Amino acid sequence: MGLVNTKKMFEMAYKNGYAIGAFNVNNMEITQGIIDAVAEEKAPLILQISRGAREYAKNSYLKAIINVVVEENPDIPVAINLDHGDNFQTCKEFVDDGFTSVMIDASSKPFEENIRITKEVVKYAHARDVVVEAELGQLGGIEEDVVGVDHDDVGKHLADPNQVEEFVNKTGVDSLAVAIGTSHGAYKFKKEPKLAFDVIREIADRLPGFPLVMHGSSSVLKEFVDLINKYGGKMPNAMGVPEDAVSKASKMAVCKVNIDTDLRLALTAKIRQVFAEKPGEFDPRKYLGPGRDAIKAMVKHKLHVLGCAGKATECK
Ligand code: G3H
Ligand code: 13P
Ligand code: ZN
């Protein structure tokens, strides 16, 4: 099967209480690590590309790699999503590039403006069988091209369930990223991690069957942070979303869980380890290879946390 959009995946995920992993890709090794895990676990897959990833590797290169993923894995439903599209023009470019899903993130704009921009993207995308994700509330953390609110202020910018019904009805959007206390990056919480499950519950009551998306969902696994710190890195107080919280949300209305930081940490930890243990190593295959293996093992584990392992067939 060719690339698919996320309609069937979300329908099955909602109905059967699991979430689809949406993994960010920036190069070949990351993509291979992910697909090797997904193929072994027979899970549905969403691959996503940020504007920063497009700038780094170009859509043409990343799309060519993803086309190979699709060709070589006919039993795995694969969707490809633009992560954090910033305006109509960017979303249009990704739709025209053959993406099957785009996210318009106008969450920093006033509510009415967010509705207007999202509606414009939905009109263009739906005419081409492409689905649209939008965002309400604001996440914390700063990535290369995705700027959020200060970590200390995350709690003040949660999605407002009162606005969700109006937003979804007015825009016709297919899924919604809702801020429930997570942040992008490796420093998500200063104290006890806390997610607003009541926000998810309230939205699900108001809009039964409507798929939600959880951004900033990496768990910042201790195994990799410890390796990074052991081998010359410096990541004190790194903290992610506990995996039991990710599992809990996945059983609720959350149908898509975004993971990027955990991929970055796995790759970086292994590369650091190789360089520390073999200072003379200069063959990229000898350090990118172990990084790719670490990504594969990590993703295999994640698919069980999300509950989507073994669900490829029912999502086709
Ligand atoms: O949501 C943010 C993703 O981790 C992408 O980050 O803009 O650095 O590629 P990036
Ligand atoms: P993490 O930084 O927690 O991996 O979140 C990634 C994300 O939300 C991409 O949109
Ligand atoms: Zn995000």
Image: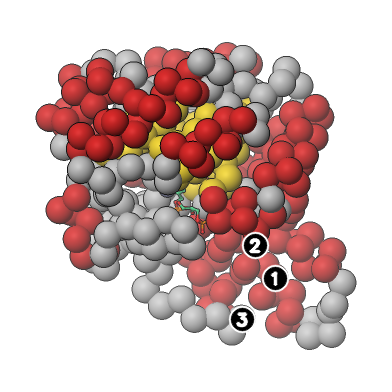
Give the vertical position of 304 relative to 52 (above or below): above
Compared across the picture, whether 157 is left or right of 1 comes to left
- The residue that label 3 is drawn on is 231
Q: Residue at x 34, y 19 (%)?
A: 172
Determine which quarter of the picture holds residue 273: bottom right
The amino acid pointed to by label 2 is: Leu
Image location (x, y in percent) of residue 124? 48, 23
Determine which quarter of the picture holds residue 115: top left
Compared across the picture, whether 103 is left or right of 300 comes to left
- The residue that label 1 is drawn on is 271
Asked whether residue 219 is in view, the answer is no
Q: Nearer the viewer, residue 164 or 247?
A: 164
Which is more foreground, mark 1 or mark 3? Answer: 1
Which is more foreground, mark 2 or mark 3? Answer: 2
Q: Earlier in the sequence, mark 1 or mark 3?
A: 3
Q: Nearer the viewer, residue 90 or 305?
A: 90
The amino acid pointed to by label 1 is: Ile
What is the secondary structure assignment of the residue under circle 2? helix
Disc 1 residue crowd, few under 14, some 14–19, many 20+, Cα 10 Å: many
The amino acid pointed to by label 3 is: Tyr
Split into 4 quadrants, where in the image is the C terminus? top right
Compared across the picture, whether 165 is left or right of 118 comes to left
Q: Residue 267: which disc?
A: 2
